[in-house]
Each structure stands twice: as C-alpha cells, then as structure tokens.
Image (cartoon, grey):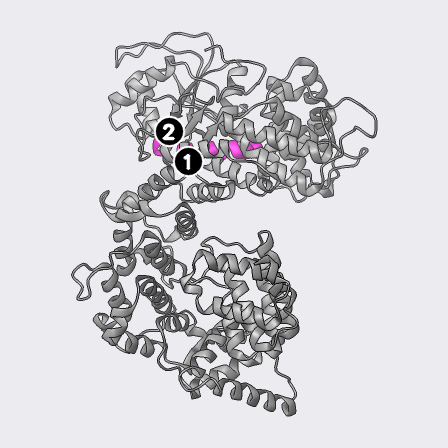
C-alpha cells in the first residue's frame, strides 16, 4: 500500500474514498487499513479536489473521526482533521451544493446525535455556515441569490428537496442561526435571513416520504419550523403505516420516541387529543408494553431507556417545584423498565444520566414519601449499585468521570458506602496529570458535601498538588534566600484554585504538614504589597487556623494576620458576613490553642485586636445568637430539655449566649446522679457543656489508612443508616467548637442529631444521654503525619 500511495492521483483518491463512503455501514478491518493509508494523501489534496469530490472526501474523513463510540474531537490527530475540514469549508464552502453541505454538517454528529466537536470547533462551524449562506441586504442582489437557492433545492427532486430544506433549517437552528417562533414574536430572533427563506420553501414544498430520522429531527425543532410544516401530522401518518412500525429498528424507535417527547414538552399537541392515538403513547407501548400488538423490543438497552428519560427531563415544560414531571406516565413507565436492566449500562452513559438527574433535582419527588418498592424509590440505589461495580481500580475510568459522578451524588445527596469505597479505591490508583488540576477542586467540594474523609486519598492529592506547585513556582519551604532559588508568589488564578481545593479538605478535618506548606506558599507576597483579594487571604488564614499549633508557629501565618489587619478599608467592602466569621476564627484559634508567644504577638496586639472588634466580632456573635434562637425554637430543644430536667434531673440549664464565645445548647457547673434511670454520671470539677453535632458536621465515611477499616454510618451495601450506637467522627465547625471548648476547660458531651432524631421513647433518650456523658470520642480524624506511624 505504501509503495503505490505516492503515485495515486486526485481521481484515484476520490474513487477509493467514494467506495469507503458507500460501504461505511459494513466496515471491515480492511476499511480501517485503507482509510488510514489514504488519510494523509487526502488531506494534502483538499484544495485540489473538485466540489463533488471534496464533499465525499470530507464526509469520509469525518466518519473516521466519528467511528468510535466515545468523542474523539480535540484529541490528538483527529483534532487536526477537524481543523482542516473546517478550514476548507471556510474557503471552498460556497462551491459545494446544498445537499453536500447538509450531509457534511450532519456528519459532525454521531448517529445518536452526540456532538463530536469541541466548543471552539462548533463555534467555527457556525461562522462557516454564516459565511456560506449569507444573503445580501441589497434587494437587487437578494432576489437572484434566493432564486439560485431555490434552483439548487429543486434540482434535488420532488422527494428530497423538501427534506433537505428541513434538515438545513434544523442545522441553522442547531448553530443558533435560526430561532423559535416565540423568540421571533418577542423580537429576540438572532437568525440569518436564510432561515425565513427556508421556512417559505418548506411550506411550498412539504417533505414527503420521510424516514424516521427525518421526522425525529423535525420533532426536536418543531418550534423553529413553526407553521411551515405540520410535524405532528407527519408523525401520525408515519406511525399509521404498519410497514414503518415493523421495519424500524430499536434505536430508531428510541430516537423517534425521544423526539416526540421533546415535541410534546414544547406544547405542540397532536391533532387528535385522544391519548390512544397519541404518537408518543403508541411508540411507548411498542417499546414497553409486553401486551402490545407488536410485542416488546427484546434488544431495548438501558442506554435506550435513559435516552427517553433524558428527553422527558431535559425538555419538559412541566419541570417545576411541584414535581409534576414525575407524574408523567411515560416517564414513570420508562423508570419502571429501567430499574431491572440498569446494571447493564456502561459507566459513561450512566454518569451522564446521573448528572442530568442532579441538574433536575427540583423535579425529583421526595423518596421518603414513596413506597419503598416503587421504581422511583429504587432508582437511586440501582444507579449507585451499578456504579460501584462499574468504577473499580481495575476499570478504565478517569478522574473526570469519577469527579462528575461524585459531584452529581453530592448535589442529589445520594450516598452508598459500597459505591463511595469503589470510587475512592479507583481514585487512589488513577494517574494524576496536569489536566487533573481542572477537577480536583470539584472533587474536594463534592467529598465535603458527601462527608467523605479518606486519609490515603487526601494525602495523595495534597502531595501531588504540592509537587505541581513546586514544579511551577519553586519550593516555598526553602530557607535559601538567593533570588534564583526563592519561590515565586502564586498568581491570583492559582490562589483561587488552591482555595477551592484546600478549604473543603480543611473542613473535612484533614491536617498535615504538606497542606500547611502549600497554603503557606499562597501567603507569599512581592515586597510588602497587600493581596489583591482579602477574601482569599482570609480563606488561607482560616485553613491554617484549623491545622493547629504547627500552623500558628509559621512566620507566614503571623505575617498574614498582620497584613489582614492593615488592609485598607476600601478593600474590605466586598467581604461578606461569612468572610468576617472566618476572620474571627482566625483570631480566635491562636487565642485558645496557640503557644504563649503567639498569643502575645497576635491576640494582644492592639491593632489586630481593634481590627477584629471593629469588623469581625459583630458577625461572629450575631451568628452565635442566630444558632441559639434556632435551637430554642426547635423540637430538639424541647426533647433535650425534657430528658435532662424531667427524666435525668441533671442540673443543666439553657446556655445564655452573653459572655460566651460559642453557643452551647446546655451547660452546667457539674454533673449529678440520675434518679429516674438509676444510673449516675461521674462527677467532675469541670463545667459541662452539651453540644449538638449537626449531620453536616458528621462524617458518613472515614478511613485512616490503606487497608484499614471503613467507619461509616451505612449499615449495608445499599447505603442504609446504621444503628445510632455506631462510632461517630465530627468535622467542620462542630469539630473546632468542641476542640476549643475542651481547651477552655469544658467537659463536652456531644449529642449527634442523626442519632437523637432516630430515638422515639423517653427511656432511649435518657439512656443515650448517660452513655454520651461517659463515652470517649475522638476529636475529628487522625492527623496525617508521615513521620508518625500508627502504633495500633
């Protein structure tokens, strides 16, 4: 092949490309070998092909890019092919006939309608279409151009000209060059003049003998077609013919059903209001109803069903907070059919489907109000169970896919220990590259929302992040003062990214020297200039304040607090109450936990103290007062008070917020025996505080080491809650609060609200309080220090 390739002429290349195009649906290994051999030669001759030859070559090259199931655009050599195709369309597009352009643009999508182009490539194609189909504003030139267009369409013949015009209008709409009827009425149209010309042509020459794919295309753009073509009538006529029903493949059924669902959701109703004659109902019965005249489709896959559900959700006009969408019989039936077969779905389509559900979270009904055996109730556990087997350390899953899945789970608040364990194990073995930087921020924020703390994973990500920063900006921990070895300050965009990465890690209770190192590097400034964003400075100081005494002794922390206190007033105007609460904690943490020399330098410094009092104190104490007010109006307060005062007789009283830096639910100077239950609480010279730990500050999943046991609130593989007597690990603001109260001399009795809410009887609550008052508990996850080995 290589020996004769150099002697091939333009016509030789065209003839072989034409053969490949005509047999593209029956590919063999020889097809791929031949195409690979002809590709470079064809690319070299793009400018020399005749117009009809060029159209064939471009379609074959696009087919090569699109032949795989996964998108290839923007990856390696395929990106060069797409770039060359777009370039030649821009220079020679006007030489091609309308039918050829129509086919070329359609080939930028897969058979299932997936876009193979990147966002920038799609924008380039839009500009090419705008250039090719531009019509002059001059009436003298406009009329001949329209006549030429009509003549080009008429030349295609009676059965094809209307369909080609319809497809071309849909292509323009897909690229934002043709708008819907509602947009035109409101004067919001952004379409090019050709769109109106095509509508008139379609109205005068309605498409005939349309295939299912043609009708599906028209259904999706029924609002763009307007009154130029009656799509609903075309659908009903097509389905009314028995041969069409019998000869359609299952993928064709699915695409047509999804398209009619889109049309229905756009409130374009069929001529006959009888649901029995509704095309959507007919197609659904063929696919789902085992008693249908045509029988069920045995080859209906989970991906096919998810395509239909996606169409119902993405385009539903009923998508409101009232959750009326899931009352749609078609959607309910699709979910019923999906649940038993969803385990057959590959990971990527399933993750896309999960993401779609998370984007339509407002439409999801409250599953706690549904029958546990209903398909909708079982949908979440079925999806998570499938993901737990599809995403494993040995499977070929990248960091992006796992992050997208975790982000969707966090948005939906779906959790399964089995699924999380599989994903964590896969992430630990996933190769980290510079492109991983794009996803680690979302990954950490998702783990925080899901309340998942896996120390080996967090250590790996922090170590990798530190290495990436060191490679780009130098070692921030070096003591060498030479200009050649001194680390460069991070740019603003890097600091923002670091904050989104490190803040959720700190809130998960992770502490390590490596995390301190990378955050400390973000505090470096050129000279004595103020940071451009005090919000980021507060975030970094807040992260360090949660790392304990090692962070307080770092010079960068001390300098950062002083720099914050000297920030100009105008630079502080953009800070929110949440930022000032963090700033107060930055000052509070070393005041309680810092060594004496740090307290003298930071806490007793007059300028710093005045800055905190003037700016942060009000926000902090207002937040504590809000927490106290919410607690006093809650059912938890009344139940706790009844248990403490009536059942146990403990001399605890509702905490008064005045004079206390933290809101505590109940406090006492000491503890006494419990006369009601017959058990006693050990006496203590310290004051006692009862602190409620909210569920958002309680880990669902915790693993301290690789191969170590997983502590989780899930009692089974489906993600059910375990018994309330299981071990708990606190994180977030509750962890800092309890740690500070203990440092101030309090004996803290934690009440886990996730446990408390599950108890119904007074006896259970009283026994629980006695157990909590004597039970030991850990102050958050174990600190991660590579120099200290676990002796246990």
| Residue 229 highlighted magenta (yes or no) | no
Give the quadrant of residue 637: top left
Which residue is drawn at the image coordinates 51% and 74% (left, top)?
102
Q: Position of residue 455 (x, y in %)?
A: 50, 25
How far apart in space, not on screen, are marks 2 and 1 (Cα)? 33 Å
The magenta region covers: 620-636
Quadrant location of the N terminus in the rendered image = bottom right
Point out the frontmost of discs 2 and 1: 1
Location of mark 1 (residue)? 392
Does 482 appear above or below 269? above
Q: Is residue 453 left or right of residue 787?
A: left
Quadrant (top left/top right/bottom left/bottom right) for the C terminus? top left
Residue with the mark numbered 2? 753
Element on which disc 2 rests: helix
Q: Determine whether, in the image, residue 436 is placed left or right of residue 678.
A: right
Quadrant position of residue 239: bottom left
Q: Position of residue 362 (x, y in %)?
A: 39, 52
């Amino acid at each position: 092949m290589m020996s004769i390739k150099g002697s091939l002429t333009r016509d030789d290349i065209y003839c072989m490309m034409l053969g490949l195009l005509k047999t593209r649906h029956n590919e063999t290994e020889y097809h791929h070998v031949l195409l690979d051999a002809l590709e470079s030669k064809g690319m070299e001759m793009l400018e020399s092909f005749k117009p009809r030859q060029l159209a064939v070559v471009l379609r074959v090259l696009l087919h090569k890019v699109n032949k795989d199931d996964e998108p290839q655009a923007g990856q390696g050599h395929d990106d060069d092919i797409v770039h060359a195709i777009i370039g030649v369309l821009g220079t020679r597009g006007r030489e091609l006939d309308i039918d050829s352009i129509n086919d070329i643009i359609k080939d930028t999508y897969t058979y299932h309608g997936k876009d193979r182009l990147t966002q920038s490539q799609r924008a380039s194609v839009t500009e090419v279409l705008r250039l090719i189909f531009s019509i002059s504003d001059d009436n003298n030139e406009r009329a001949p151009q329209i006549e030429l267009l009509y003549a080009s369409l008429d030349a295609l013949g009676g059965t094809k000209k209307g369909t080609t015009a319809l497809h071309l209008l849909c292509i323009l709409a897909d690229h934002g060059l043709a708008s819907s009827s509602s947009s035109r009425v409101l004067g919001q149209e952004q379409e090019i003049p050709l769109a109106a010309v095509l509508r008139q042509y379609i109205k005068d020459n309605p498409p005939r003998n349309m295939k299912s794919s043609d009708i599906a295309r028209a259904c999706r753009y029924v609002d763009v077609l307007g009154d130029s073509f009656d799509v609903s009538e075309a659908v009903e006529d097509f389905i009314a013919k028995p041969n069409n029903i019998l000869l359609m493949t299952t993928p064709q059924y699915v695409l047509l059903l999804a398209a009619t669902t889109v049309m229905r959701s756009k409130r374009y109703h069929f001529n006959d209001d009888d649901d029995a004659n509704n095309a959507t109902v007919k197609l659904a019965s063929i696919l789902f109803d085992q008693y249908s005249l045509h029988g069920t489709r045995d080859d209906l896959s989970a991906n096919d069903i998810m395509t239909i559900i996606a169409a119902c959700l993405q385009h539903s006009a009923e998508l409101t907070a009232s959750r009326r969408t899931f009352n749609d019989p078609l959607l309910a039936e699709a979910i019923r059919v999906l649940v038993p077969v969803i385990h057959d779905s590959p990971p990527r389509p399933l993750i896309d489907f999960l993401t779609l559900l998370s984007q339509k979270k407002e439409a999801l009904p409250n599953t706690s109000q549904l029958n546990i055996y209903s398909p909708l109730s079982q949908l979440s556990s079925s999806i998570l169970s499938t993901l737990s087997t599809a995403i494993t350390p040995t499977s070929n899953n990248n960091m992006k896919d796992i992050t997208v899945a975790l982000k969707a789970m966090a948005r939906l608040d779906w959790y399964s220990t089995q699924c999380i364990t599989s994903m964590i194990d896969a992430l630990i073995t996933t190769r980290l590259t510079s492109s991983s930087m794009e996803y680690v921020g979302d990954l950490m924020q998702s783990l925080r929302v899901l309340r998942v703390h896996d120390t080996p994973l967090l250590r790996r990500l922090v170590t990798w992040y530190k290495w990436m920063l060191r490679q780009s900006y130098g070692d921030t921990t070096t003591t060498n003062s030479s200009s050649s070895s001194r680390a460069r300050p991070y740019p603003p965009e890097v600091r923002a990214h670091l904050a989104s990465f490190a803040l959720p890690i700190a809130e998960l209770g992770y502490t390590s020297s490596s995390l301190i190192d990378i955050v400390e590097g973000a505090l470096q400034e050129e000279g004595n200039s103020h940071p451009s964003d005090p919000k980021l400075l507060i975030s970094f100081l807040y992260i360090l304040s949660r790392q304990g005494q090692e962070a307080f002794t770092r010079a960068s922390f001390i300098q950062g607090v002083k720099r914050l206190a000297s920030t100009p007033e105008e630079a502080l105007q953009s800070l929110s109450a949440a930022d000032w609460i963090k700033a107060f904690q930055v000052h509070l943490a070393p005041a309680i936990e810092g060594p004496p020399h740090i307290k003298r330098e930071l806490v007793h410094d007059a300028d710093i103290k005045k800055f905190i009092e003037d700016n942060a104190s009000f926000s902090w104490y207002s937040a504590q007062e809000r927490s106290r007010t919410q607690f006093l109006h809650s059912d938890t307060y009344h139940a706790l008070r009844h248990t403490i005062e009536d059942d146990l007789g403990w001399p605890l009283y509702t905490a008064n917020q005045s004079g206390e830096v933290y809101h505590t639910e109940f406090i006492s100077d000491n503890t006494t025996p419990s006369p009601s239950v017959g058990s006693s609480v050990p006496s203590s010279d310290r004051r006692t505080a009862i602190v409620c730990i909210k569920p958002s500050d309680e880990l669902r999943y915790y693993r301290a080491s690789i191969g170590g046991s997983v502590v989780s609130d899930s009692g089974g593989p489906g993600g059910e809650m375990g018994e309330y007597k299981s071990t708990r690990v606190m994180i977030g603001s509750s962890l800092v609060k309890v740690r500070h109260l203990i440092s101030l001399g309090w004996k803290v009795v934690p009440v886990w609200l996730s446990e408390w809410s599950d108890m119904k009887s007074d006896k259970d609550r009283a026994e629980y309080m006695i157990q909590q008052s004597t039970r030991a508990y850990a102050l958050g996850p174990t600190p991660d220090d590579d120099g200290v080995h676990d002796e246990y």
